[in-house]
């Protein structure tokens, strides 16, 4: 199972790189660009999670299988959120969003 | 007394710090590899400038996981004096030994020049030999020296007199015109609540003798020698 983490500077923190990119876009003729915020993107692949999904019992109803997958996704989300908090983002200046891929 | 200078892969001011403390000050100094776990009986620990671990992810973000950092943290917790210079300051921020964070310089560019820095507090191990409001000419060389803390944290830093150095004019006037990187409140260096851990972006070790253009930085390192007599903490 894979998850994506989007890290951006908090709105209260000035983003000088984003400002320069915005200015460059305006210079290129995109006069309607008001602001750009530059961020970071991580794709995290977790071992074992796919196998757990593949081993879902065939005896289970489709609904029960879905519930199991959902539980797994929730677990992955919790784990990756922890990673973002501890390392991928600096909570003093950055915020993040975690997205678990189907 | 003994200065231990931590060497991370990518440190580039480690020998400058070693030279300034051993040759110029005439004290004992040791270079300690980041994978070591022992600070070799340090009286003072210096985290030097450079680009530890290539500054991957964020400046200082990976260095905080170096094995030696557990020893540095324990040393700081016991009250031992720790100085983080430039990248070393960034490592202290990421390691949570100092509050706040660094963002890219407001004018994007890497800034490498000599600036004037005003000493705001003289009751830290690295400023005790300075005169109050003394102005030091020190080189800076960084791309991410724009200090940020949220408004509550910043107010607390000011209230507790934790801002140790500010960028200023040669006459000691602090204003945005003399702020090279957009740092909040013109902050060039801070200390922790206990005042034994100090981080600053300018390089005192690169201004340790006249031949280098300025000897103003020596007082920062000499302060550590002076303060040690009155500091009591366990070395191990």
Image: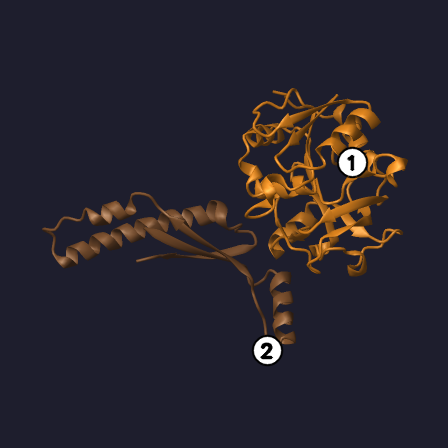
Labels 1 and 2 touching (C-beta < 8 A): no
Hey, which residue is sitting farthest front in the picture?
A28
Q: Which residue is mark 2?
A: A30
Residue at the (55%, 41%) spot, across then down: B62
Q: Which chain is brown?
A: A
Residue B178: give x, y in percent of width and height: 81, 56
Disc 1 chain ID = B
Vertical side of A1 occupied by B228: above or below? above
Residue B10: give x, y in percent of width and height: 64, 38
SS for tag 1? helix
- Quick check: can you spot residue B123? yes
* Quarter residue B103 falls in: bottom right
- Quick check: can you spot residue B127? no
Q: Which chain is orange?
A: B
SS for tag 2? loop
Q: Would you call the spot at circle 2 few (<14 residues within 10 Å), some (14-19), or many (20 or more)? A: few
Residue B181: give x, y in percent of width and height: 72, 55
Report the disc number at residue B205. 1
Vertical side of A30 occupied by B31: above or below? above
């Amino acid at each position: 199972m894979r998850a994506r983490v989007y890290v951006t500077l908090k709105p209260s923190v000035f983003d000088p790189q984003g400002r320069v990119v915005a200015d460059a876009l305006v210079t290129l003729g995109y006069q309607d660009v008001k602001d750009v915020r530059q961020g970071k993107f991580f794709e995290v692949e977790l071992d074992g999670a796919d196998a757990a999904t593949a081993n879902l019992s065939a005896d289970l109803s489709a609904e029960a299988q879905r519930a199991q997958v959902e539980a797994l996704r929730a677990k992955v989300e919790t784990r990756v959120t922890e990673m973002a908090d501890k390392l991928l983002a600096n909570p003093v200046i950055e915020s993040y969003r975690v997205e678990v891929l189907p | 007394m003994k200065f231990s200078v931590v060497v991370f892969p990518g440190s580039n001011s480690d020998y400058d710090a070693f030279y300034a403390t051993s040759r110029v000050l005439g004290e004992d100094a040791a270079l300690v590899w980041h994978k070591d776990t022992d600070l070799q009986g340090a009286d003072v620990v210096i985290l030097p400038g450079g680009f530890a671990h290539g500054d991957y992810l964020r400046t200082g973000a990976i260095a905080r996981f170096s094995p030696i950092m557990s020893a540095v943290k324990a040393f700081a917790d016991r009250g031992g004096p720790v100085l983080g210079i430039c990248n070393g300051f960034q490592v202290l921020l990421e390691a949570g030994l100092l509050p706040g964070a660094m963002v890219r310089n407001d004018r994007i560019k890497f800034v490498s020049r000599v600036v004037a820095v005003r000493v705001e507090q003289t009751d830290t191990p690295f400023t005790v030999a300075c005169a109050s409001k003394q102005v030091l000419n020190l080189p800076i060389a960084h791309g991410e020296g724009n200090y940020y803390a949220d408004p509550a944290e910043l107010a607390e830093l000011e209230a507790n007199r934790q801002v140790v150095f500010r960028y200023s004019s040669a006459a000691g006037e602090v204003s945005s015109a003399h702020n090279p990187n957009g740092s909040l409140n013109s902050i060039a260096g801070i200390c922790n609540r206990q005042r034994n851990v100090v981080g600053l972006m300018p390089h005192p070790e690169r201004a340790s003798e006249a031949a280098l253009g300025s000897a103003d930085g020596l007082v920062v390192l000499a302060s550590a020698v002076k303060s040690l007599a009155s500091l009591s903490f366990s070395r191990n």
